[in-house]
Image (tube, helix red, strand yellow):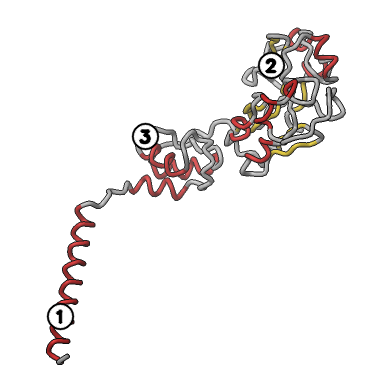
Amino acid sequence: MSVTNILIATVIVAAVGILIGLFLGLAGIKFRVQVDEKEEAVLSALPMNNCGGCGFAGCAGLAAAIAKGEAPVNACPVGGEAVAKKIGEIMGVSADSGKKMVAFVHCQGDCEKAQSNYEYVGAEDCRMIPFVPGGGPKACSQGCCGFGTCEKECPFDAIHVVKGVAVVDKDKCKACGKCIAACPKHLISMIPYDAKYVVACNNTERGPVTMKECSVGCIGCMLCAKNCPVEAVKVENFLASIDQEKCVGCGACAEKCPKKAIAKASK
């Protein structure tokens, strides 16, 4: 092959490369997706846990919603007040801090307090409860079965099964809500971080039945509601509940509860 042919081939290859480069460059400009700078800034401020606690599929979805004004700047439960303030500065709005919330398991029926109907041997997954006789081995079918699905789902290591009952470490909890979604018995709810007292029971059976099942179950005796000075406690379906907005933390309900079904939330 002559030198001339080599040079011609080189020029052709170079020309084709330049043309392809120009085509790709023009195509990139024409079909470029416009990026919202605020959305990018908000995304960089989020913790990137992608837990879904905000109601969106991940942090990218939340960032897009905040940038469009479709979600509040304090929508991230994991980031808390610090992240809300940073995003508020990006969006040019004030970030209402709101109350810090944490998960709480409404059950104290551990291995020592709750009666057991039989010894369970099988898959330890709370989602199997519909297929387990009696809703689990514990006599109280509405209590925590202790299989730890919530523990496995928590991305922050904030919930652990202790003596057969799930317990939340409120200082680690980020209120993402994954444990709530994982519990088939709906035993977990969000309460204010600074809540003083909470009903640690979910049993709606009549008093005599509950007493046979668990030594710390609510029997619906009404003593808590009758002795609350601010009417923050009510009893429905033989189960007490506390309105945390009204509660002043006096502890009268816990003191009068004969079964100690009302516990300190700070434990």
Mark 1, other Cα within 10 Å: few <14 / some 14–19 / many ≥20: few
Amino acid at pointer 2:
Ser
Task: Estimate the spatial distance between the alpha carbons at disc 2 and disc 1, rounded to whole Å.
Answer: 83 Å
Q: Which residue is mark 3?
A: 69
Taking depth in this image into account, of 233 and 152 the one nearest to the observer is: 152
Q: Which mark is residue 170?
A: none
Q: Answer above or below: position of 34 versus 129.
A: below
Looking at the image, is mark 2 or mark 1 nearer the viewer? 1
Q: Position of residue 203 (x, y in %)?
A: 73, 17
Q: Position of residue 71 (x, y in %)?
A: 42, 33
Q: Answer above or below: position of 177 versus 85.
A: above
Horizontal relation, residue 188 to residue 119: left or right: left
**Outermost front residue:** 1
Q: Earlier in the sequence, mark 2 or mark 3?
A: 3
Q: Earlier in the sequence, mark 2 or mark 1?
A: 1
- Residue at position x 20%, y 72% in the image: 17
Q: Which image quadrant is residue 218 in?
A: top right
Q: Which residue is mark 1?
A: 11
